Image: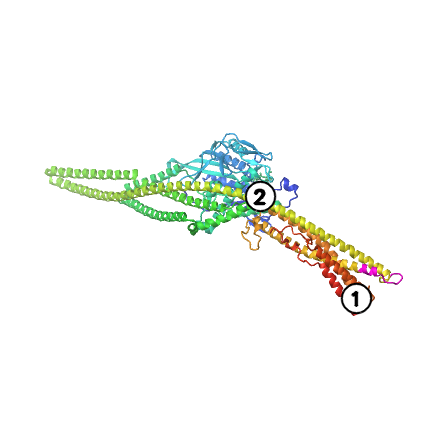
Amino acid sequence: MEAAENCSVKVAVHIRPFIGDERTQGCKECVTVTTGKPQVQIGTHSFTFDQVYGNDGSPSSSMFKECVAPLVDGLFQGYNATVLAYGQTGSGKTYTMGTSTKDDCQTGLIPQVMNELFKKIETLKRQTEFQLHVSFIEILREEVRDLLNSEPVGKLVTPKGNAVKTAVPGRPPLQIRESSNGIITLAGSTEVAVSTLQEMATCLEHGSISRSTGSTNMNNQSSRSHAIFTITLEQMHKTQSISAVNNTPDEGMSEEYLCAKLHLVDLAGSERAKRTGSDGLRLKEAIHINRGLLALGNVISALGNEKKRKEGMHVPYRDSKLTRLLQDSLGGNSKTVMIACISPADVNAEESLNTLKYANRARNIQNKPVVNRDLISTEMQKMCQQLQYLRAELCAHVGGPTSDIQVLKERITWLEATNEDLRRELHEYCSRRAVLECCESGAQDGHACFMKSDVHKRAFQSMDSSYCQMDEVVSDEKPGESDVVAKELEHALRQNTMDRELNELNKHLEQKESEMKLVGGADTEALKQHFQKKFMELEEEKRIVQQDRDRFLAAVENHAANSDAQRQKRQEINVQKIKALEAQISDVKKKQENQVELLKQKKRSDAAAKRLQAEIQYIKAQKVQLQRKIKQEAEQFRQWKASREKELLQQLRKEGRRNEYERHKLEALNQRQKMVLQRKTEEATIATKRLKELLEAHKCSVRDNSVNHNGHTPNGQRNEKSLQKWVDHELEVMVKVCEVRFEYEKQIQVQSALAEELTLLKEVDQLSLNGDIPHRVNNGHSRLLSMSPNARMERIASLEYMLSMSTNALKAMVSQLSDAEERECGLVGRRKWNQVHSLSEAKSLLQYLFNATAESSRDIMCADGTSGTFVNAERNGHGTDWKTLEVEEKSSPVATSIQMEVAEAMETLRMD
Ligand SMILES: Nc1ncnc2c1ncn2[C@@H]1O[C@H](COP(=O)(O)OP(=O)(O)OP(=O)(O)O)[C@@H](O)[C@H]1O
């Protein structure tokens, strides 16, 4: 397999146009695109992506060519690819991907992928054999379902009367499997072999029809599941192989087998139950959808954090089925494009902003795509290499024994180096295993110990953030759930670590076994035989040469009788021949020695192979042990989870009852407070009205008096009765002013208490929307935090109503009090007493005032027992500080003011 190169996840934004409801509601655009740049602004936030389509970005029609066509090309080179549509519900994911059965969207990405795929196959089919398979699955309520299974689809009718397509209950969900080399597969999923565009389109159509959809307030054909349409492209290239000796094309053809997958993912949309109006089954689906998306978000966050990634931070792929299936697409062996779909409408601004933030994080993910050659193909390549190696060896043999030894020496050095590497890896593995075992025993010892590990701390942090985000989605978070999440996380962590260990073990095992093949087995045997044969050949050669020499010596002796000259000549020739033969013999002897040396080296490599074999046995034993442990761990966790879920269910029921009781109590309180405030406001209004009448009467009397010469009767005599009437009137004005002022102050206090509670409730509401609701407040308002969102909304509405009532009453009181003040200013000092002309008038007036005071005091005493005008009906510790409505003053303000008036009148007369 080729070395993987890093390649980041590409992110494009697709802004759809306004649709039906948004147009009728008169929504405004809240998303702007910077001209000529892939930049999107929403509110004060600005994001830069790889591409932006729609709403004045590039036209949507160019999305396929720019984002997806390169992935299709890569598929033909053997690279896996993924296209992922993400966004809030109704933002146009299904439309963008083209899986909708509603819109006849040939412009969707999947139909365009299919066209392009078949176009390319048509042009390449001469030199390559192609095979195409498709599968189509959905993840519905955390279960993986096959959409191409030909069994019929069930129909369900919701209480609202909407037909909903659901998977047939009898159809078992698919199981996710992970192979020893970390490849994720779906056991038993339908893989349809297709050979034409029409066949593939039919699969897409059938799957889309079977997919679970339903109607919500935000999309009348909302996808209720995450759907993955996978195209598998297998290709067999026929290439001419190149000779290793002289780099010329061989006469034989070699075959290259590539297999790559393209996942086209239409995620279900994130949604807020409040906005979609989901309840019952819909709400359950929404919870699962949001959970899956949250898990995906956590994976994206973990992968997007470069620092933590380098530190080898845990990536929580196992938290959901969605993230497990997309494991290779995010941070793995795939070229990935994410398409973030958003609505331009201001009503969706918050969701669009969240989508953009989510997508922005995904840009930091680095994938490592590699060309996917099939194992057989890789094996074939290995064999070709081996063939070339053997050819080179053969050439070396032909070249003589020195190069032979050289080749073998190099091979031995290589074997020793590999052996050393393996020994080091084994050592590392043993020490890691020891750490793991220590960790496990620590985790069993208790939670505190669990928190000590850095990895676990990080896991807890991510758990906290996930928990808060879940709070946002599922407002009625259950107590004790954090415990379950922690345990689940702990379990997932442990399983993940053990799985990784198992994978590593498997990898080591595979590696060692392949090395073993090289070092030992048939290869060793062949070499051994080769050397023995060679040895025998040399022996044979030696024997033949010796025979030749002997033959020559015999011939020399036979010819001894010949003539001297001839004999001399022949002898010389024979001596030369003998010398040559002896040189040949010594050469053969040397060769023999070299072969002996080679055999010794072979023995050494055999010993190395034996050691390797022992190591393989050891790793296999460890693997079995680890597998057993994983099984045990999973079973223990399953049992614990079942009992915990039972417990949680009971707790939830209890919680539900408590919430219901609280809600009733709060409703009653709101009602009571409204009534009391209404009564109080009415009383204040009556007092204010009376004051107004008095002030108007006073204005008239001033006009009359000016006509009648300052209160004198036409015949010039003072009328005692009219003087008393004037005093009565003045007193009543004063009393009413006091009463209204008193009411005014009380209303001010009530209003500020109401406003304080309202502000606090709004703050709490805002915080809970943002997901960072404080768990504790120190000003005694903890009750407000424990309110459910609905109760909080009711309380806010009720407070706003009471506040407006109080404000109206205050306005009326302020106006009358300022009139009274104006009047008071006009009567400063002696002008007020201009009516009193003589001491006798003053005396009689004083007597009258004393009587009035006495009568008032008596009235007060009588009314004392029942004077709780401001009944505090809400003394139950709830809500606003209603103590302000209690009667605080036992002595009447009226009596006090009368006494003050009397003292002032006396003073004025004395001065006269
Ligand atoms: N680019 C577009 N142009 C015109 N109409 C669009 C576009 N994108 C989406 N729509 C319309 O908007 C509506 C919602 O789109 P769609 O069903 O694709 O949303 P979704 O994101 O898949 O929603 P859900 O997550 O609920 O399944 C549909 O009626 C669709 O026809």
Vertical relation: 442 (above or below) 83:
below
Residue found at the far left of this picture: 561
Report which residue position mark 2 lands on. 660
Looking at the image, residue 398 sits to the left or right of residue 777; the answer is: left
Residue 799, percent from left and from top: 64, 50
Q: Which residues are magenta?
A: 713-726
Label 1 environment density (alpha carbons within 10 Å; few <14, some 14–19, many ≥20): some
Whether residue 717 is in magenta: the answer is yes
Task: Please indicate, yes or no, whether residue 30 appears anywhere in the rendered image.
Answer: no
Q: Earlier in the sequence, mark 2 or mark 1?
A: 2
Mark number, residue 699: none
Q: What amino acid is labelled 2 in the image?
A: Glu
Q: Nearer the viewer, residue 553 or 110?
A: 110
Q: Quadrant of the N terminus?
A: top left
Residue at (60%, 39%) from the top-left corner? 217
Q: Which percent across, then down, holds residue 44?
A: 59, 51
Whether residue 255 is visible, yes or no, is: yes
**Mark 1 CB near ligand 1 (8 Å cut):** no
Q: Nearer the viewer, residue 740 or 182?
A: 740
- What is the quadrant of residue 634 in the picture? top left
* Residue bearing the label numbered 1: 830
Name the amino acid type tagged 1: Arg
> Which corner quadrant holds the C terminus?
bottom right
Compute the Cα span from label 2 to label 1: 67 Å
Location of residue 802 in the rendering, given as x and y in whole percent from the top left corner: 67, 50
The quarter of the picture showing ligand 1: top right
Q: Position of residue 81 (x, y in %)?
A: 48, 41
Q: Label 1: state its secondary structure.
A: helix
For the residue labelled by badge 2, is the local secondary structure a helix, a strand or a loop? helix
Give whichever of 178, 625 is nearer the camera. Answer: 625
